[in-house]
Image (cartoon, rainbow, N blue to C red):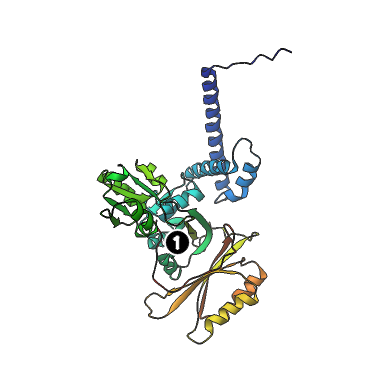
Amino acid sequence: MAKAKQTHRSKATIRRDIRDIDKEIIAAVCKRIELAKELQADGEAKENALDWIPKVVGSSNGLEKEDGARLLLEIQSLCQKQLPTKKISYLGPKFSYSYLAATSEFGSFKTLEPLRSITAVFESVMSGQSTCGVVPLENSTDGRIADTLTMFSTNAVRIVQEIHLPVGHCLVGLGKLSEIREIRSKAQAISQCRGWLAENLSSDVVTVAVNSSAEAAADAKKRGTSVAAIASQEAAVGYGLRVIRQGIEDQSGNLTRFAVIADPAKDFIKVPKKTSCDKTSIMFEVPHQSGALADVMNVFKRAKLNLTWIESFPKPEVFSEYTFFAEFQGHRDEVRVRNALRMLERKTEQLTFLGSYPAVGKLNDSRSGTSGSSSKQDT
């Protein structure tokens, strides 16, 4: 039986078809921008990508779900850039890990504003200059971010979302490994790579701590082949550096958790609704008497609430007194959570509700912290 004759298309024809498809994509995005503007004119402050992206990606063909979701998030971010919306602030500079966390959730086309400190992010949110802010909360290697917890104790903001960002450190620079005489990065990043540095570099290579890993990458670009940085792969690309070595962190699975914060007094903020897997964050102070903290712990036990994190840290400007930050499974809209919060108000001197929001990943590991030295993640 004779085989069907195959039709061979010229490369010029294929290129023309690709250009036609690109024109259709641009036209579709422009149409989407107009629809987004129409939504805003009708009083809708924000599209919730979490509502519709999974449904669209689930019905697509030819793309991995993760790639399809990322593509749609970027398109949504591009559309919202055309709208008169406020900024999202983060602990900068650009290409820092906080920047990567922000873009992973909001897309790179969103109006993102880098700020030099966690305090500045909180102040920008409270003043209304930013719709929301992205701040580091804890790192799986270094633990709590003390500056963030302190700011929660002095600012009436809510956590409306959490972001988990795997942190992989790279050695980046302009030269070769043998040329390096100085390595720059955030102090915590240097600490997290101490073993690799000792094993792979000579003892006369010096380490210099700077404000952020992104700043270190910028320094490596300016200072030549003898200076390298510990930073992200994205920072290397952004500053035109070579990735000399990947994955140089001593502990695999390094993860930083970020909080998306917002001012609950602003009418454009939507409080997260209850889902099948939620987390609630609170801060509280207990009286100076025997068994006070144990009484608080018993509240969680009686309510059968899984306490996933409790951390104590010094009260600002008050010696030998501490505030507790705690997180547990559940949402404020649940009866058992509401009852537990009412009981906690009786057992504590002060109780601050920081928010109920969807949890990322599994919450089956309980962690506890102490009032030890402060630690800051590599921004």
The outermost residue toward the right is 1
- Give the image location of residue 293, x and y in percent: 53, 80
- Residue count near mark 1 (Cα–Cα under 10 Å), binned few <14, some 14–19, many ≥20: some
The outermost residue toward the top is 2
Q: Is residue 347 visible?
A: no
- Give the image location of residue 352, x and y in percent: 52, 72
In terms of secondary structure, where does tag 1 sit? loop
- Give the image location of residue 281, x and y in percent: 54, 67
Which of the 4 image quadrants contains residue 306?
bottom right
Residue at the spot 51% in from the left edge and 75% down from the top edge: 284
Count how many numbered circles sit on residues in the image.
1
Q: Is residue 287 above or below residue 44?
A: below
Nearest the eye: 329 or 318: 329
- Whether residue 253 sits left or right of residue 343 in the image: it is left
- For the N terminus, the quadrant is top right
- Give the image location of residue 267, x and y in percent: 53, 59
In the picture of the structure, the residue carrying the numbered disc 1 is: 141
Nearest the eye: 171 or 15: 171
- Whether residue 210 sits left or right of residue 249 in the image: it is left
Q: Is residue 223 above or below residue 270?
A: above
Residue at the spot 45% in from the left edge and 57% down from the top edge: 251
Q: Is residue 1 above or below residue 64?
A: above
In the rendered structure, which amino acid carries the disc numbered 1? Thr
- For the C terminus, the quadrant is bottom left
Nearest the eye: 321 or 375: 375
Q: Is residue 60 visible?
A: yes
Residue at the spot 71% in from the left edge and 12% down from the top edge: 2
Which of the 4 image quadrants contains residue 56?
top right
